[in-house]
Image (cartoon, rainbow, N blue to C red):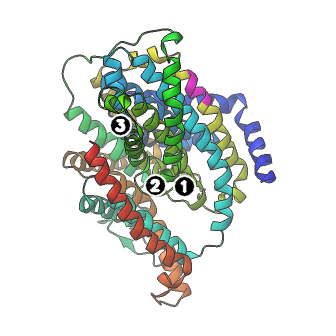
Amino acid sequence: MIDNFEALLAGFATAIQPEYLLYAFFGVLVGTAVGVLPGIGPAMTVALLLPITYTLEPAAALIVFAGIYYGGMYGGSTTSILLNTPGESASIVTALEGNKMAKKGRGASALATAAIGSFVAAGVATVGLTLIAPILARWAVTLGPPDYFALMIVAFMTVGALMGNSVSRGMLSLALGLFLGIVGTEVLTGQQRFTGGVPVLADGIDVVLIAVGLFAVGESLYVASRMRSGGVHVIPVTKGWRNWMSKEDWQRSWKPWLRGTAIGFPIGTIPAGGADVATFLSYAAEKRMAKGKRKSEFGNGAIEGVAGPEAANNAAAAGVLVPLLTLGLPTTATAAIILSAFQSYGIQPGPLLFENQSALVWALIASLYIGNIMLLVLNLPLVGIWVKVLQVPRPYLYAGILLFAALGSYAMNFNYLDVLILLAIGILGFLMRRFGYPVAPMVIGGILGPMAETQLRKTLAISQGDLSALVTSPFAAIAYVSLILIVMVGLWLKRRQTRLE
């Protein structure tokens, strides 16, 4: 524990350097902006900025991406409350009560409880990340190839089954991702797979193209196809800190903040739907615990319905980083793209990350504390700026996204075929969104697929082809049993979520 504290202090010594403070500020600023804008989430932005990993050092790039991730969770509440249009899916619940508060002239109170709740939850959850991650990493060093393969199967099945409204569509999306992941030259035999004789595919489809194509290009085409004509009506916010929160608002919010944190962090650490499920579960808990007059306020602007889900949202964001850093397992789309950013530097998140890249990972964790303070400043006194961001003309916005996506993909290898692949994946992403297929399982399949294949081959090589080796390991057996339980619990939570909607 003392060693971890000293490592964290060393991380702060790195993170407070002016250069890294600027990178952290840039990340949270961009993250808040994209969280505010409807249709643009942290996954799209991190995907769009992935090409910067070719120019920035690892610590700088990862601090930027972590800031975008945290900032996106903060910023989504603004558009949910003032526009009744969630900036990203985890802010859907906030719109239920927050927009009702704004229509009653209490928009400032709703924004304040969302921002302060996010700050409290992210701070507590980051402390949890600091304490739990090193312990989990030390334990994970003892796992073998069968255990890692089992973990990846758990990630595949839960993400495929729990993301989206249909299990079959989620699994089909995952299968498409696994297919894209195996395109290229097979490592052991040197045989080319599914390349169609196209030389550029011999090295495989870069995960950057998959992520940018699905999230930046596909999402932009989808949102643009559903764009409303005319101006955007934003509910005005009363200025002045005295209008933020009354004494009664504080009394009604602090317990939901803590309950939301307690719900969000553990759910974020397992592949069971991430922040989306955590926010709906928090909302259900607050609604169930409300009594008397306060119970009747739900559906009409209950402040607890904003405080709890926003805390759960940001706590889950920190929870997601636990399996990502210690096991190399992403449980959300954004985490999957951050994983690919690690891999672009030749760094593999997992048990050895805290040993081999100790300075990097502790600087990243320290930057989360710093970025959280920056976000509180950005989201309370400067809320007027984010209201103006909502007025950005959508055609300019999405045209810019498509331009940067094309330039970024071309800059990777300076090959025009990469742009064509990007366009093809983008059109596929648009069609998937259009017909209700989740894209996150496809990204996770494309990133984890080759890793799962490697662990499978290692297991079979060690056991001389004995398939029973995949399930006879004690941990692997526990993982498969846990898989069944996670899927059952996750599907039950999704049914609750559907009833709340």
The residues tagged by marks 3 and 1 sit, at their Cα atoms, a distance apart of: 26 Å
User: Residue at point 46% right, 55% down?
Assistant: 331
Determine which residue is flagged by label 3. Answer: 93
Classified by dominant secondary structure, the portion drawn in magenta counts as helix
Rendered location of residue 127, percent (x, y): 65, 44
Camera-nearest label, 3 or 1? 3
Residue 409 versus residue 269: which sits nearer the camera? 269
Residue ID for mark 2: 331
- The magenta region covers 373-377
Q: Residue at x 24, y 45 (%)?
A: 430
* Residue type marked 1: Leu
Q: Is residue 384 visible?
A: yes
Between the residue at mark 3 and the residue at mark 2, the CA separation in whole angstroms equals: 20 Å
Q: Which mark is residue 294?
A: none
What secondary structure is found at the residue carrying circle 1? helix
Quadrant where the N terminus lies? bottom right
